[in-house]
Image: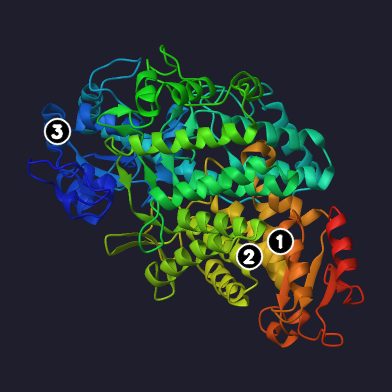
Amino acid sequence: MKVGDPMPNKSKPNRLIAEKSPYLLQHAHNPVEWFPWGEEAFEKAKRENKPVLVSIGYSTCHWCHVMAHESFEDEEIARLLNERFVAIKVDREERPDVDSVYMRICQLMTGQGGWPLNVFITPDQKPFYAGTYFPKTSKFNRPGFVDVLEHLSETFANDREHVEDIAENAAKHLQTKTAAKSGEGLSKSAIHRTFQQLANGFDTIYGGFGQAPKFPMPHMLMYLLRYDHNTGQENALYNVTKTLDSMANGGIYDHIGYGFARYSTDDEWLVPHFEKMLYDNALLLTAYTEAYQVTQNSRYKEICEQIITFIQREMTHEDGSFFSALDADTEGEEGKYYVWSKEEILKTLGDDLGMLYCQVYDITEEGNFEGKNIPNLIHTMQEQIKADAGLTKEELSLKLENARQQLLKTREERTYPHVDDKVLTSWNALMIAGLAKAAKVYQEPKYLSLAEDAITFIENQLIIDGRVMVRYRDGEVKNKGFIDDYAFLLWAYLDLYEASFDLSYLQKAKKLTDDMIGLFWDEEHGGFYFTGHDAEALIVREKEVYDGAVPSGNSVAAVQLLRLGQVTGDLSLIEKAETMFSVFKPDIEAYPSGHAFFMQSVLKHVMPKKEIVIFGSADDPARKQITTALQKAFKPNDSILVAEHPDQCKDIAPFAADYRIIDGKTTVYICENFACQQPTTNIEEAIQTLISSRD
């Protein structure tokens, strides 16, 4: 059985058996006669005059599993659905466009969202009822799914006018919400309001933002690092380090196998929702790397090394691409793979090492999670433990590493969680960007090699006739890429360039940007649509700017347009970002902290910055000296263009093509707003000038 495939089932398969999505395949043997999203399902609904259930989830979703077992494997519910509805299953990770439209509807109708997402729509795709998890029968103050199906089928049959009114109003609201607004752009005051809103929501005891469930939200931390860099606001940096330290100590971090879980169910980061997502670990890799640049805290470097170790061991295909997720559940129990009894620890490690491990990692007879233990360092006092045990810091570290390796080996004998092994362009791009940044900052070639293996896979398998695609699995490529795929891939190319100074990555970034603008840019109002002009038409063509667990495509695009425009001198790209400041101003001013990644672009645009141009032979120690110094430094406002000779820049960065190399030596130009100071070959002086300044 392949990784990512569903468990064998002897019942007759439905249409989903022909799909490659691990999530759809999990439902391929349900008694429900599921359709994948497509014309066949909607033609049947029109022909038979039936409402449509669109049920959306993903393969590692705990409550999706619960509802599948309670309802979609149930013969009574299957009979109701098959007789009175047309049922469609959607993998939200393959069709984020469908998910985005109907999630917005669910939030409009119910005030909340989440997965599984179950939306009832008319045959022409207009929604009239929505919800998330439904138990089979009423409980948890939620209506039972049987009752919902009975009620909706009767209403659709007997009060169609009412259904159509609801559906029409919902569709109109979506279209109104998506209409672009224009006017003046965002100002510096928006930058400070974003910080203030984040500061107001900061958990001063445990770090992070808001109350449980608490998500890592690395893009908020990335914003705060930039705010600190530009303003010197010390609380901004404290909020970052407090959060990163608390997460690294908590149970949300896997202290045995490494990697972060999706979120914490409590305020102190102890009990995670145990699924591990590629995007979380990618974005956290970037956040910890940037925090290391700012603080030089070796713990952050260690966490980055461990994230990459985990990704290599458990989330990397042989072809160099990355899996999407690991499930929270094993054998029907959430977290079973990751938790321990004290007895298991002592049996594996022996009494002496076992008791030391239990003392350090909060392992008790009673447990901290449903009678078992999640290893964590939240309340650990390592100085006291070292003193009591008569150990040096190095001796304690060696013992704990020995214990970790033994426990990992024992854990690997357990039933492994389900792996969603599809390759998503957008999430792979985030990991490529994270690896490239780690390679740049830590000067580690093997990280760059991992990133380049993955980008090569995307270029060879997920770009078809010049069009970026969404997903690869088991030899099949599916769905035309969305703005997220293009914007995140652009991010990856720019970080690959900064890690390697290989101009081919800049050239690819420019080509990708041209394609992105051609496919997604709203020529009338500005901003990027979620879907390309060549995509399937849904009931609305959305523009998303809100930064959730993953930053939005528009937010990432705005930052990358500024980066590419600055390094190449292409002012048209910078103007496009300025247009986006106006288009999305109302959304951002209403909720600044919900757009923290987008606000990085505003910070970058309005704050002082430098364009640095370096010419010199790649094997010249002077060039290596200054480029290494710049790669290690946290200079988010600045751009760095590096080439052996100005002639290499004539196509990609024509503003630098007429510069010259002085006396055959590595030559540095320091520019502001594309006006440059006198070039210098004094590398020490140039480094001092560039590294010591905040901008």
Dot 1: what SS?
Answer: helix
- Disc 1 marks a residue whose amino acid type is Gln
Disc 2 crowd rating (10 Å Cα; few below 14, some 14-19, many 20+) is many
Outermost front residue = 390
Q: Where is residue 381 in the image (x, y as percent from the top left)?
A: 63, 21
- Disc 2 marks a residue whose amino acid type is Ala
Q: Where is residue 79 in the image (x, y as percent from the top left)?
A: 11, 32
- Disc 3 marks a residue whose amino acid type is Ala
Q: Do the residues labelled 2 and 1 touch (CB within 8 Å)?
A: yes
Which residue carries the number 2 mark?
A: 499
**In whole angstroms, how far apart are the C-alphas of marks 2 and 1?**
7 Å
What residue is rendered at 33% in x and 28% in y?
A: 336
Name the quadrant of the C terminus.
Answer: bottom right
**In whole angstroms, how far apart are the C-alphas of marks 2 and 3?**
53 Å
Which residue carries the number 3 mark?
A: 78
User: Which scheme is used to colour this image of the protein?
Assistant: rainbow
Within the image, what quadrant is residue 672 found in? bottom right
Foreground pick, 210 / 392? 392
Q: Where is residue 191 in the image (x, y as percent from the top left)?
A: 76, 43
